[in-house]
Image (tube, helix red, strand yellow):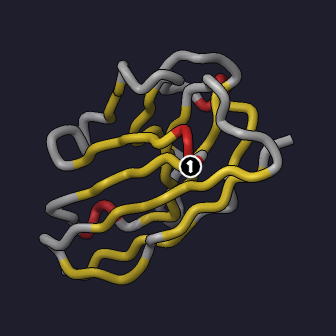
Amino acid sequence: QVQLVESGGGLVQAGDSLRLSCTASGRTFGSRGMGWFRQAPGKAREFVASISGGGGTRNYAASVNGRSTISRDNAKNTVYLQMNSLEPEDTAVYYCARAQGIFSVDSETQYADWGRGTQVTVSG
């Protein structure tokens, strides 16, 4: 089984940028799709971004599209989420996950492995 560990979260001001990282251990990413999700206080977990195993396909939630970029380095078993122009509404715990297949998918049910999350807090 793969272990996923997120890092890079923190407290920032509106308009700032952050880059989240997720590194796998135990097993490599392989050719699996990877995704980022987030959960704000009192809300359900929601899709943020995903990337296919080869990196050629990327999908974004409308709320972050144009402000965020997902990328991956398979040699380092790491996936990244660059977030720019952060807004207070981006405040949440951010989770990375490894998909069951190779595709870029936005449904939680398609993900088999999850990290424990990293907190992002954006002050207004």
Query: Percent position (x, y) of residue 33?
Result: 56, 26
Query: Percent position (x, y) of residue 61?
Result: 32, 35
Query: Percent position (x, y) of residue 111?
Result: 67, 30
Q: Amino acid at mark 1?
A: Lys
x 53%, y 16%: residue? 103
The number of discs equals: 1
x 51%, y 37%: residue? 35
Q: Is residue 10 left or right of residue 33?
A: left
User: Relative to the observer, which residue lies in front, 14 or 74?
Assistant: 74
Q: Residues within 10 Å of mark 1 (few under 14, many from 20)?
A: few
User: Relative to the observer, which residue lies in front, 31 or 82?
Assistant: 31
Q: Is residue 32 above or below residue 36?
A: above
Query: Percent position (x, y) of residue 82?
Result: 30, 54
User: Relative to the observer, which residue lies in front, 53 or 101?
Assistant: 53
Q: Quadrant of the N terminus?
A: top right
Residue pushed farthest right? 1
Residue linked to disc 1 = 76
Q: Is residue 91 above or below residue 96?
A: below
x 53%, y 68%: residue? 7
Q: Secondary structure at mark 1?
A: helix
Q: Quadrant of the C terminus?
A: bottom left
Q: Is residue 63 left or right of residue 29?
A: left
x 45%, y 64%: residue? 92
